[in-house]
Amino acid sequence: MNEQKMPNPVNPLLKFWGIMLAITLILNLIVLPLISSSRVRETSYSFFLDSVEKGTVEMVQIEQSEINYIISQDGITQVCKTGIIDDPTLVPTLREKDIPFGSVIPSEPNPIMSFLLSWIMPIAMIGLMSYFLNRNLRKRMGNMPGMQFGSGKTGKQYVPDENSVKFSDVAGQEEAKESLMEVVDYLENPEKYAKVGAKCPKGVLLVGPPGTGKTLIAKAVAGEANVPFFSISGSEFVEMFVGRGAAKVRELFEQASKNAPCIVFIDEIDTIGKSRGSSFSTNDEREQTLNQLLTEMDGFGANKGVIILAATNRPEILDPALLRPGRFDRTVPLELPDLQGRIDILKVHAKNIKISGDIDYNYLARATSGASGAQLANIINEGALRAVREGRDAVLQEDLEESIETVIAGQQKKNAIMSDEEKKIVAYHEIGHALVAALQSHSAPVEKITIVPRTSGALGYTMQVEEGDKYLISKSEALARLATIAGGRAAEEVVFNEITTGASNDIEKMTQLARSMVTKYGMSDEFGMMGLSQQSGGKYLDGAEQMDCSQATAEKVDKEVRSIINAAQEKARQLLRDNMDSLHELSAFLMKEETITGKQFMEILNKEPVA
Ligand code: ADP
Ligand code: MG
Ligand code: ZN
């Protein structure tokens, strides 16, 4: 491979001083003379003589090369000047008119002093100013707890200390940890790999939904590795000095190869790694930065000992050139934590707070299916905050349970007032959901229902706890779920013979599920396994579904979806009509207590003879 060396750019320091010299020159040669001359009027010699004749001249000062004089006319005094002419009659005339005149002894200005004043001072001042500005900026950027700001110009070098994150702080994500451990091991013992002839991956891309710990695990690599670790965020390339993105990439890699073996971490790489030309508004700046990154990644051989880590939650928008082997040739996925993962994450974060009594992590994890690591960390923190609010000095199980609802469903609206009529409707609605769920064997049991309104807008809140994680949903489960969602509105119908706006969220969820059953999961009789939709957005960020069929088929799909929904609604209504006694009793309980647990619910339900 023949390596091409880019021509060295002008030393930035040299450029800086150059600009300053130019500023000083302009100041001294153009601006200052302009200012000082603006107040003195330049006149001709004859005008001067005329003025002397007219007697408007008050004072004359003859200097080496010019004559300055003051005229005063109609109460206005003005300083004027004119050139010197060898005029022997001038002195007698002035004497005759009785105008005071004189000449100044040309004060030989101290050449060193004036040079210092007009040339060195401004340069020194500008230099000092930029130094302080720079220092402030750096201070602000370097304020990272447990980390130190390295000497680098681009990126920060992390120097691990006893507070920095270790792999033990990252719960779950075992595959990712293993994969990264191998990379770190390679940097520390390259001989081991060289013996077998194994090449280390040049780049490792961490991908996963937001909050799954990508940044965290990269920091843990820094904490574990015994090699220098440079970190920069993709947005930093674009943020500070517009137009310097490419130069910054170059600087970063220069620095890295000087410090090899080392690790370079680029967080949020999608900000610069976006596929080129994929959008209408192409961003030249970003494109140049990306091109530079590609060039740099090719620039050093696989065994130079520089490994690039990058993180993104939008791998599909990355430029394909970035992902080809030889650049980021290894992708490490970080997924949302499963049940065990959630238990571990909760435990890791619970270590940092004071806890009293037993905490049922299993229960907490089961109630937070689908939560990301960041949300779980937040739940623990909210629990601690609640304990403080309640004036306790340790966190209880109930704090954490409450904070799950806070984080997932929004804060409890303590002072929102609901009329009794509204409360009644909401209670029936929520019990409708729960009852339909409980009456169908396939539905998940209800853990808790509350009708205390939340700021997120949900009036009631039914917490369903799944037994373990579900990866597959059968058709009958999907149908049961549809009936459960329909249960809320159905209860309003069968009890009040009236419907409310409270079901809007249900309608959305129902339609989505029913449509997916037809277009995505092949669960309709009409279309069977025919795929009818396409995901348009990212894989990790919920993208919109797009229909992928003819207009005529789309109409049929709508019909099919409607019939599925209608069937679910009818089923829910029927179930509720058959269990009116339970519905009334449960709703009355919920209205009175505002909260009903799964256990209380089942007790009341089992008391009634099931039809
Ligand atoms: P992202 O993937 O968006 O970069 P972060 O790494 O910034 O997510 O995670 C945010 C926070 O969530 C972390 O600081 C940490 O407190 C918590 N967190 C996420 N995943 C985990 C995990 N696997 N173990 C422990 N904490 C985690
Ligand atoms: Mg991150
Ligand atoms: Zn509802």
Image (cartoon, rainbow, N blue to C red):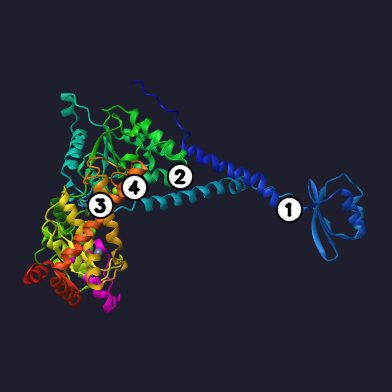
From the image, tell me which residue sits under label 3: 514
- On the image, numbered disc 2 is attached to which residue? 241
The CA distance from mark 1 to mark 3 is 82 Å
Q: Is mark 4 within 8 Å of ligand 3?
A: no
> Between tags 1 and 4, which lies in front?
4
Per the image, the residue denoted by label 4 is 555
Cα separation between marks 4 and 3: 15 Å
Give the magenta-colored segment's residue range.
Answer: 401-428
x and y, in percent, of residue 498 in the image? 28, 71
Q: Nearer the viewer, mark 4 or mark 2?
A: 4
Residues at circles 1 and 2 in contact by the CB criterion of under 8 Å: no
Q: Relative to 601, is 73 on the left or the right? A: right
Query: Looking at the image, is 569 positioned above or below residue 589?
Result: above
In-front residue for pair 143/3: 3
- Label 3 sits on a secondary structure element that is helix
Given contact means CB atoms under 8 Å apart, are the residues at marks 4 and 2 in contact?
Answer: no
Q: Amino acid under label 2?
A: Phe
* 114 in relation to 354, above or below: above
Relative image position of residue 140 (x, y in whole percent): 38, 53
**How many angstroms separate mark 4 from mark 2 (CA)?**
53 Å
Per the image, the residue denoted by label 1 is 38
Look at 17% across and 66% down and name the residue there. 576
Quarter of the image for the N terminus: give it. top left
Q: Amino acid at mark 1?
A: Ser
The image quadrant that residue 53 belongs to is: bottom right
